[in-house]
Image: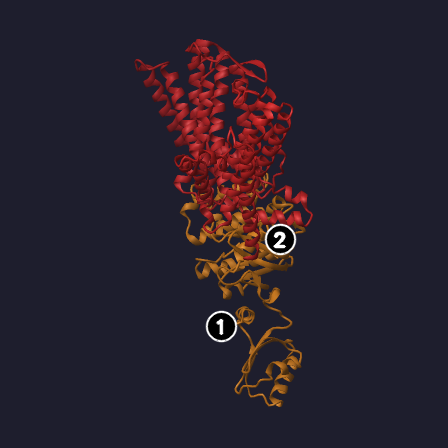
Chain colours: A red, B orange
Amino acid sequence: MNPELERNIWLELTPRRVLMMVGLLGLTFFAASLAEGLERGPAGAASILFYVLVVIWGSRNAALSVVGEIRDRTWDMQRLSSLSASTMMWGKLFGSTIYNWLGGAICLAVVLSDLVAHQGPGSAAIELVFYVGIGVVAQSASLLASLIAIGRRQAHSRLDQFIYQAIGLLAALAVYHFWSQADPVGAAARQPDAIAKIVWWGVALDAPAFLLTSIALFAGWTLLGCYREMRLELKMRNGPIVWLAFLLFMGIYVAGFDELLVPALKQWDVVALRLLRAGSTFVLLTYVMVLLEPKDRVHYRWMSGQIAAGYVVNALRGVQAWMMSYAGTLVAGVALSLWLLHDIAAAASGLPLVLSELGFVTRDVALFVLMQTLPGRRRGDVGALAALFALYVLLPAIVDGLGAKASLFLFYPQLQAPGWFGVLASWLEGAIVAGAAVTRLALSENER
Amino acid sequence: MIEVENLVYEYPTARALKGVSLRVPDQTITALVGPNGAGKTTLLRCLAALEYPYSGKVLIDGLDTTQSPREIHARMGYLPDFYGLYDDLTVRRCLIYAARSHGIAPDVAPRAVDKAAGRVGLLDRLDSKSGELSRGLRQRLGIGQAIVHEPRVLLLDEPAAGLDPQARRDLSSLLLTLRDGGMTLVVSSHILAELEDYCSEMVIIENGMIAGGKAIKVRDDDRPRYMIELATARADLREFLEGRGADVIEADQIHALVAFTRNPGARAKLVRDLVGAGFDLASFGESNKALEDAYFAQVGRRA
């Protein structure tokens, strides 16, 4: 047996705790069967209890699985074990939540037996995939959030732990929201406007099957993310391939939704709009990752040193996800620009928009790095977010209030004129902030 | 066994190690000493492949810490200065977990546990919960967990902190037993007198560098350390001693700490030469605080 799982079983599944869980759930279901007006009787109660035990409580335990080891000073001993990253990851994820899954399994048995009796085994199988999927997504998202924070050497206060749990709950909420639009067994089954088909890359697909597959795929990516973060904790290096594959997956996945292809610019064709959707996804991932990942100036100096010494492959092993996402954004932006050149009308309005967006993304990413090089860098990300708030909200509001709406191109991309001035301004700002960040990084080398 | 070449480690705000080079021979116990904040723990963590060096190289048993960290972890035991135990598990289960997580098969693990528990004197406590153990017994369990898989290298950060004199003596004998059993140990500590009982070499870390640039032999049976004291100051004391084959570790105009042959005839001749040359010799004797003498000789100041 996985030693980490075994250790968790020793701690979590003591006879007393198991008896308590079984007894309490049994009593609850018995009470639910006697209660009047409770939807679906024990099955309804079991469904709610599954969310409480596996999603809410389970995501908390998953968030604490590594953070708790750090707090209790046992993490170094575990890192020095010879367990593989996958063994450690599975042991942590399902070991820390094994008690929750015990309760969840009992609840699922009640829910599924009710479904089999009333709607047949097919419906029960669909719901089983959904319930397991939402539990895995919630718990693995919490674990992933905690592992990313550990990489940032972040404090492990109760607030931090709550944030990791909240991220898992948000992921679960997203899964629940999308699934409830098409759930053929649950809420959506009773709604006349339930989604039956989803058009993806021009093909009409069965909505429940598509959503269940999507949930499984995203659960898989989240687990893969946990595995890779665990590798980093165990001092193994990750190459760029997996993140690039994830970028590609996300680009293809998001660009495929025909319903999202509402033309912001009437002259743009479907290909341009799909490229825009994929590029926007890369932009979003760039911002998310540059916020989440550690922006360690020692690491950046190490990378530049490796490149200067000609060890490019070594340096590539240290490339972070935000860098690849930014590169993906540039590639998508250039591809979109080239495509727009086929149509003069589309290019006239679209090119300045796309190119200025690239410039502003460059500025914003450089801002995050720059803030980490300034004194008080522990609050660097907060400082960067504050600066972005000023650039995107406060200053434009002031400029607008002063009646200088035409100057808004200085802050973010504009759909209308002044077009190429916006491109110039955005790249100038990007170059200045990036130059300042690189200069600060170089200066910090001399401060040693 | 351990080779460190020009190791540089940086925290975002400071450079903790500034080009440390070091070689720790097989089956030795090396003391890592130095003031607080000197970089001892950082060096130990780099040796344990828990931190990547900024530059330079750390080789453990021929393996590079940046290339093969997990292989190094498998053959490494490490007890940090502050560590935790699973308080709700029994000593036996703590040790079984440590053994299993180091790749020891389930059927072999109980034997490994008994051996480790016997070495650290916890055989009679195997069924006690670790949370119920005293400070000294917890320290033993920590060491037990670090050695249950018979590592080639054992790193201990302040292992004697908080131990009573008897427990320290037990620790000394345990470390010597482990060394004799084939392990290579690096022990960080503030307590020089305690290190003297079991260390063969000493590395002084000061301000992220090795003071004196290399490890110092703590005891050399062929060339022990002698303390020479004069009644009247002489400026040429160092030069005189060096001219007669003594390795001067530290000297001023009144005192000299030298490494010199144990041969009684040679020592008698050195004393005769000193007296004959007009040195007002007050005392000449083997130093019984070799580690402390060597430490302050390198660091260059007295406490």
Q: Is residue B279 above or below residue A7?
A: below
Rendered image quadrant of residue A37:
top left
Label 2 sits on a secondary structure element that is strand
Q: Is residue B159 above or below residue A93?
A: below
Label 1 sits on a secondary structure element that is loop
For the residues beneath circles 1 and 2, the answer to whether they share a chain is: yes
Indicate the chain on which mark 1 is placed: B
Please tell me how many numbered marks the rendered image carries.
2
Q: Which mark is residue B302?
A: 1
Indicate the chain on which mark 2 is placed: B
Rendered image quadrant of residue B202:
bottom right
Q: Position of residue A80 (x, y in %)?
A: 56, 45
Residue on which disc 2 sits:
B55
Residue depicted at 60% across the width and 57% down the height: B179
Mark before the other along the chain sequence, 1 or 2: 2
Rendered image quadrant of residue A362:
top right
Q: Position of residue A408 (x, y in %)?
A: 47, 35
Q: Is residue A308 left or right of residue A357?
A: right
Identify residue type, mark 2: Ser
Q: Residues within 10 Å of mark 2 (few under 14, many from 20)?
A: some
Q: Quadrant of the N terminus of chain B?
A: bottom right
Q: Nearer the viewer, residue B136 or B36?
A: B36
Q: Residues within 10 Å of mark 1 (few under 14, many from 20)?
A: few
Q: Nearer the viewer, residue B117 or A108?
A: A108
Q: From this viewpoint, is residue A287 visible?
A: yes
Q: Position of residue A133 (x, y in %)?
A: 50, 24
Q: From this viewpoint, is residue A3 visible?
A: no
Q: Position of residue A427 (x, y in %)?
A: 56, 39
